[in-house]
Image (cartoon, grey):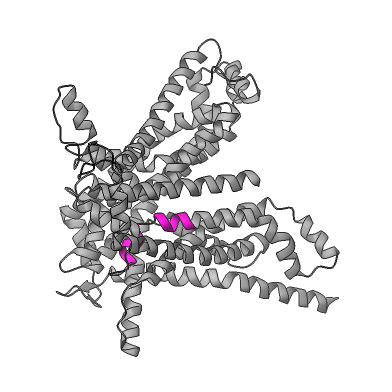
């Protein structure tokens, strides 16, 4: 690919930098290496998709085409219930974390205040704390809260979709802040000043000027939050209760026992959803 | 004038409080406070039913430091994380260079191919390797055809390592690409003009200038790997215990469960992470100079 590159800016520069006839060899070996890495990344995914259509009941060999596993999957109330739970949790988590995250991004980008550095630390810490630590901490916290509720009202609560959602929101907020702040940084503040000069109040300035202009960033943050919630496994495992399991947890519980093509089928569907979300976020970025 | 200014100031302060409060409360209540709780738990004990008993003790930490089960889990997890990070870096750096040096029209599609696994469910991607490495799976089928015969591939330490590298590679490539894409390759030319050979030019120009990407990628790979338990369970067959496996068991499945000990393990893991990352930053910032 490098060899056939048109001699435009970047590739011409590279040719200059890595010239003296060796380009072909180093370029070629780099290309071959990269193709191998891409194969490494994609062969397992492709095999997973192919084997969601195999007749083999263990789902690891090709013994002919069938659509049965998908039909079985759609007739499996546990799986469908878990899928529904996952979508509900992801939707609620996305809405809440996007709103809270956008507000935080505005505060951090537009104001100077005491304790701003500490706030900065608090916002970014969830990104660097290992998820399992967050998960066990939230588990211990929810147990204490449930104990207190039981002592005060006598009501016995168990972990449910709400506890999972709270956890998902807690780690999604930080990622939303990062994405929205980027679009606030690239924002031309003179537009807001112009609106103010023309007599707009701050409410109108935000909703008519700022919000539409940073909307791509907000949607980008929301898509990331949605994906994070859909894909999350660790916090979901620790915080979901009996009967309110999420899709990744359900997949994990079944995979630990045995490989079945039904799991290949649900994995393929999850893969398709991720691809659709990547495509969507890329489309949005291109429009930006 | 003063009153208008004061009014404006007051309104600004009110607006700031409005913007900050929900996020601040959420993060304090559902992130910071839970961490404080497990820190406190790590100094408690538990009874035979697995309930936390509020009697301050250092026993959990003593247990972790004196029993080989726990010491080994820490060493094993640290070693696996270092290995995974280094291998991802060695694979990811050339790949990121390749993407950054590709012709403009190729760059976006090549980057998309990294983004898709980046956004795809980690569990699903690890599970895919179970199919490949299974005893009657594809690789063993191929090995039989060429006459080598079947090998035990699944439920080995090698399988765990492959899974970790496979799972984390996209998280290394993206920050590396961001740094390398910004790198001005004419600087390599300038170095060559001044008499540097390629290795010198790389070590003294390109490597330091792309160091932020290396650091970001390494941290992104190292942190989740240190706490992982899915890969060693699904591909390693849970034969040996990594940190994540032990913590998960102590919190969810042990009989009786032992949250104080699990909390101590989690607290120590954060400490290990902090120390290692600080050491790493020191080394890499020296490199940058």
Report the front residue among A216 and A273: A273
State left or right for residue A8 relative to residue A55: right
Residue sitting at x 82%, y 59%: A194
Write down the region rendered in magenta. Answer: A226-239
Report the front residue among B201 and B222: B222
Give above or below for B109 relative to A148: above
State left or right for residue B113 relative to residue A268: right
Return the x and y of residue B13 as percentages of the image width and height.
Answer: 68, 73
- The image quarter containing residue A105 is bottom right
Is residue A189 at all visible to an observer of this figure?
Answer: yes
Q: Is residue A104 one of those drawn in magenta?
A: no
Residue sitting at x 29%, y 83%: A156
State left or right for residue B262 relative to residue B191: left
Q: Is residue A238 one of those drawn in magenta?
A: yes
State left or right for residue A105 relative to residue B270: right
Residue sitting at x 22%, y 60%: B249
Is residue B282 at all visible to an observer of this figure?
Answer: no
Return the x and y of residue B164 as percentages of the image width and height.
Answer: 32, 42
Return the x and y of residue B78 as percentages of the image width and height.
Answer: 29, 46
Give above or below for A154 relative to A63: below
């Amino acid at each position: 690919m490098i060899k056939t590159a048109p001699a435009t800016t970047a590739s011409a520069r590279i040719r200059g930098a890595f010239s003296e006839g060796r380009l072909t060899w180093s370029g070629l070996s780099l290309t071959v290496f990269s193709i191998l890495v891409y194969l490494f990344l994609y062969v397992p995914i492709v095999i997973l998709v192919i084997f969601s259509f195999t007749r083999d009941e263990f789902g690891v060999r090709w013994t002919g085409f069938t659509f049965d596993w998908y039909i079985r999957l759609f007739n499996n109330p546990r799986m469908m219930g878990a899928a529904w739970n996952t979508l509900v949790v992801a939707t609620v988590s996305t809405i809440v974390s996007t709103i809270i995250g956008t507000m935080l991004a505005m505060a951090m980008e537009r104001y100077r205040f005491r304790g701003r550095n500490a706030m900065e630390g608090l916002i970014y810490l969830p990104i660097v704390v290992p998820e399992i630590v967050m998960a066990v901490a939230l588990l211990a916290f929810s147990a204490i809260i449930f104990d207190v509720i039981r002592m005060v009202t006598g009501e016995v609560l168990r972990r449910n979709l709400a506890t999972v959602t709270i956890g998902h929101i807690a780690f999604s907020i930080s990622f939303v802040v990062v994405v929205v702040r980027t679009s606030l940084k690239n924002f031309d503040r003179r537009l807001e000043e112009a609106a103010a000069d023309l007599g707009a109040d701050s409410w109108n300035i935000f909703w008519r000027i700022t919000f539409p202009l940073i909307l791509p960033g907000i949607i980008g943050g929301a898509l990331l939050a949605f994906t994070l919630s859909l894909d999350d496994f660790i916090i979901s495992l620790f915080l979901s209760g009996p009967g309110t399991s999420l899709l990744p947890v359900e997949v994990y519980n079944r995979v630990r026992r045995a490989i079945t093509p039904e799991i290949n089928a649900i994995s393929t569907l999850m893969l398709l959803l991720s691809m659709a979300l990547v495509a969507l976020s890329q489309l949005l970025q291109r429009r930006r | 004038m003063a009153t208008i200014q004061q009014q404006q100031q007051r309104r600004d302060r009110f607006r700031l409080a409005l913007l900050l409060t929900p996020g601040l409360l959420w993060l304090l209540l559902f992130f910071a406070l839970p961490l404080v709780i497990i820190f406190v738990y790590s100094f408690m004990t538990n009874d035979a039913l697995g309930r936390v008993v509020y009697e301050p003790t250092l026993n959990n930490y003593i247990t972790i430091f004196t029993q080989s089960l726990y010491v080994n889990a820490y060493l094993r997890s640290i070693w696996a994380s270092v290995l995974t990070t280094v291998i991802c870096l060695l694979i990811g750096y050339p790949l990121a260079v390749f993407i950054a040096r590709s012709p403009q029209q190729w760059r976006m599609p090549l980057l998309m191919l990294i983004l898709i696994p980046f956004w795809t469910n980690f569990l699903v991607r690890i599970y895919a390797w179970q199919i490949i490495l299974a005893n009657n799976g594809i690789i063993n089928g191929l090995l039989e055809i060429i006459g080598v015969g079947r090998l035990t591939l699944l439920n080995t330490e090698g399988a765990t390592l492959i899974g970790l590298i496979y799972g984390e590679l996209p998280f290394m490539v993206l920050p590396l690409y961001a740094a390398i894409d910004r790198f001005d390759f004419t600087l390599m030319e300038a170095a060559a003009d001044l008499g540097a050979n390629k290795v010198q030019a790389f070590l003294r120009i390109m490597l330091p200038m792309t160091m932020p990407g290396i650091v970001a990628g390494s941290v992104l790979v190292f942190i989740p790997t240190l706490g992982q338990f899915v890969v060693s369970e699904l591909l390693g067959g849970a034969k040996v215990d990594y940190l994540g496996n032990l913590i998960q068991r102590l919190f969810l499945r042990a009989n009786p469960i032992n949250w104080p000990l699990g909390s101590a393990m989690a607290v120590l893991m954060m400490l290990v992470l902090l120390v290692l990352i600080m050491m790493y930053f020191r080394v890499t910032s020296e490199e940058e100079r």
